[in-house]
Image (spheres, rainbow, N blue to C red):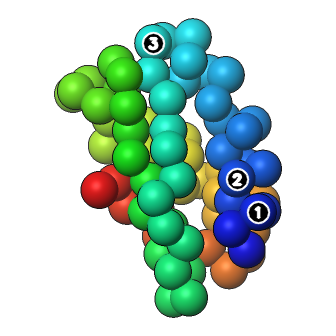
Amino acid sequence: MQEQVEKALDKIRPALQRDGGDVELVEVGNDGVVKVRLTGACGGCPMSQITLKQGIEKVLKQEISSVKEVVAV
């Protein structure tokens, strides 16, 4: 599943990088929880939780049915 998550994140990265940020995969748990780290401009952005839930989590859940939640660490 980790490879699937990386591929899905690669689709999201260009949008984040245009705004000076990025996302780094930290861990894919057996329980369906994906842990990521928002970096660059995304790391300190007040909108980062919206980006995480409405953007990253939404795409990962659409692409990979076993993803239950995406959390920032």
Residue 56 percent across, percent down from the top left: 55, 46
Q: Which mark is residue 20?
A: 3
* Residue positioned 29% across, 56% down in the render: 73
Q: Reading the chain from its start, which is encountered first: label 3 or label 2?
A: 2
Residue 54 percent across, percent down from the top left: 49, 45
Q: Circle 2 — which element?
A: helix
Residue 6 percent across, percent down from the top left: 70, 53
Residue type at tag 3: Gly
Q: Circle 1 — which element?
A: helix
Whether residue 50 sits left or right of residue 25 in the image: it is: left
Q: Which mark is residue 3?
A: 1
* Residue positioned 61% across, 73% down in the render: 67
Q: Which mark is residue 6?
A: 2
Q: Reading the chain from its start, which is encountered first: label 1 or label 3?
A: 1
The mark lying in front, picked from 1 and 3, is 1
- Do callouts 2 and 1 mark residues in contact (Cβ within 8 Å)? yes
What is the quadrant of the N terminus in the image? bottom right
